[in-house]
Image (cartoon, helix red, strand yellow):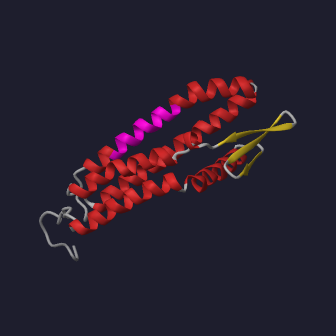
């Protein structure tokens, strides 16, 4: 076969990224964590924007006003504010800051770290968006007050917990994986 060198294929082994690259990444992670906390409002506005769009895809009349998602219900509107406690930003900030020392001191491939952090962010974001959809559906189905109470406290907490655990598993597995790719 043309181009076949014969024998076993060459395996690319991950090699250490220069310590300077890892340290720049670690500092950027801490900076990103601080930015998520200091500039939290634009993050919440973006989350509300995505949530309102997702609800419209589900054929629920919704609109976004700043960091609030307003939903049509029984001839009126109710709103869900994406507060600091309801945003994915602070939780992601904790993980960014918490993973930074590992990147600083451990010999981790940069691509692996970035992939693991991306997976974590996607899982946390999707879990939070799913949680809010469930809250909206419960409020529309059971009434604003009762639906919010039940879905926010019980179902929402369960969804957040599952997303959190899955995110942690992906982050730890992703950063600890033995892969065969360049760093």
Q: Position of residue 87 (x, y in %)?
A: 56, 44
Q: Position of residue 174 (x, y in %)?
A: 31, 49
Whether residue 30 is situated above or below residue 79 in the rendered picture = below
The answer to whether residue 108 shows anywhere in this view is no
Residue farthest right in this picture? 75
The residue shown at (69%, 39%) is 80
Q: Nearer the viewer, residue 19 or 176?
A: 19
Quarter of the N terminus within the rendering: bottom left
The residue shown at (85%, 37%) is 76
The residue shown at (55%, 39%) is 85
Q: Is residue 38 magenta?
A: no
Q: Is residue 114 left or right of residue 78?
A: left
Residue farthest front in this picture? 38
> To which quarter of the image does residue 169 belong?
top left
Q: Is residue 102 left or right of residue 126?
A: left
The residue shown at (61%, 42%) is 83
The secondary structure that most of the magenta stretch takes on is helix
Whether residue 13 is situated above or below residue 171 in the rendered picture = below
> To which quarter of the image does residue 42 belong?
bottom right
Q: Nearer the viewer, residue 92 or 164?
A: 92
Q: Is residue 160 magenta?
A: yes
Residue farthest bottom in this picture? 2
Quarter of the C terminus within the rendering: bottom left
Q: Is residue 9 left or right of residue 89?
A: left
Q: Is residue 99 left or right of residue 143?
A: left
Q: Nearer the viewer, residue 128 or 98?
A: 98
Per the rendered image, the range of residues in magenta is 159-171
Q: Position of residue 39 (x, y in %)?
A: 54, 56
């Amino acid at each position: 076969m043309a181009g076949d060198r014969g024998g076993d294929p060459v395996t690319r082994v991950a090699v250490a990224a220069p310590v300077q690259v890892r340290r720049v990444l670690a500092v950027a992670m801490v900076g990103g964590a601080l930015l998520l906390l200091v500039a939290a409002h634009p993050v919440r506005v973006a989350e509300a924007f995505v949530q309102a769009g997702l609800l419209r895809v589900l054929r629920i009349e919704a609109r976004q006003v700043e960091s609030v998602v307003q939903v049509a219900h029984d001839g009126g509107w109710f709103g869900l504010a994406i507060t600091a406690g309801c945003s994915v930003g602070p939780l992601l900030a904790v993980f960014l800051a918490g993973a930074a020392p590992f990147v600083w001191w451990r010999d981790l491939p940069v691509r692996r770290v970035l992939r693991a952090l991306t997976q974590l962010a996607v899982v946390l974001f999707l879990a939070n968006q799913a949680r809010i959809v469930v809250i909206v559906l419960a409020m529309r189905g059971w009434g604003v007050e009762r639906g919010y109470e039940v879905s926010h406290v019980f179902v929402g907490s369960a969804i957040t917990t599952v997303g959190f655990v899955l995110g942690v598993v992906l982050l730890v597995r992703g950063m600890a994986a033995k892969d065969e790719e360049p760093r």
